[in-house]
Amino acid sequence: MIIQKILNNNVVITLDDHKQEQIIMGRGIAFKKKVGDFIPEEVIDQVFRLANQDTSLKFQELLGDLPMEVMQLSDEIIKYAKTKLGRKLNDTIFISLTDHLHTALERIRQGIEIKNFLLWDIKRFFSDEYFIGLKAIEMVREKFDVQLPEDEAGFIALHLVNAEMDEEVGNVYELTKIMQEITNIVKYHFKMTFNEDSVYFYRFSTHLKFFAYRLLNHKEFHDEDDGELYEVIKKKYCNAYNCVNKIADFLMEGYSYCISNEEKMYLIIHIARVVQTNS
């Protein structure tokens, strides 16, 4: 491989067989090297190919200032997350997670801890991502002998949710807030406490996540309009229907969002199931 650009002693840019830029990493890979020199494959540790040019440029800029060990750990966590979640993650995760890990490590070394005020809700609504966050903390401890607080597992989880939904982390905070507000309406309407280990609560939370995503992005849900089925669901689950009307009123007042009958129908079904299995 021929060096096109040197970012630091450990990271260079080369071209693949299709003349697309790729980021090559290896300890001391560019030491005493210059643009145009050959890099033998045996000294290469990792290769990054990012489809989006803007993302690739931002990643290159970030890599120029970060220790190689942080980059390697971030890549390990991302690979672990992809396997565990079984979902595609946006390439921006390479930027956001790598930068976050570096910043978190620097904060801890300086004795600074940042509280994650959404930690409890992240545990509830994004349990898979939170579990990966806990695993990431364990991996940090093994590699750097630094113990990150549990709050960091929540922050890492938010970065993963962000990469799953192509959202900014700030929007994921707002998304989590909406999920919490809707869940509270259901809880107080039925005067109940959720069994958060239930598969039905997991399905309800997953539905809420994508519902809140559509709301924030002003993307209405459209399915085959079956007014007859909606009327049947209303009558069968009348208490859940009344609860969904409260949710609809709240979202109209607070977010100027009008829930379609299709969205109402799916919310009714999920709420009815989670309530029935919780009693």
Image (tube, rainbow, N blue to C red):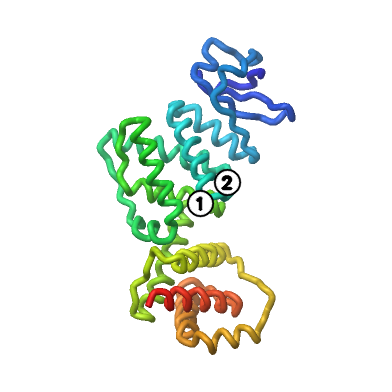
Q: Front-most of 32 and 149?
A: 149
Report how far apart the C-alphas of labels 2 and 1 lie in the structure.
8 Å
| Residue 8 is at least partly visible in this image | no
Name the residue at 63% across, 29% down: 22
Asked whether, in this view, residue 188 is left or right of residue 50, the answer is left
Q: Amino acid at mark 1?
A: Asn
Picture layout, residue 43 above or below residue 248: above
Name the residue at 39% across, 61% down: 124
Residue 173 percent across, percent down from the top left: 43, 57
Circle 2 residue = 90
| Residue 155 is at least partly visible in this image | yes
Residue 215 percent across, percent down from the top left: 54, 67
Q: Single out the residue that lies furthest toward the left.
A: 111
Asked whether, in this view, residue 242 is left or right of residue 43, the answer is left
The C terminus sits in image quarter: bottom left
Q: Which mark is residue 114?
A: none
Picture layout, residue 15 above or below residue 115: above
Residue 123 percent across, percent down from the top left: 38, 57
Mark 2 vs mark 1: which is more N-terminal? Answer: 2
Find out whether the residues at labels 2 and 1 contact each other: C-beta distance under 8 Å.
Answer: yes
Picture layout, residue 259 above or below residue 49: below
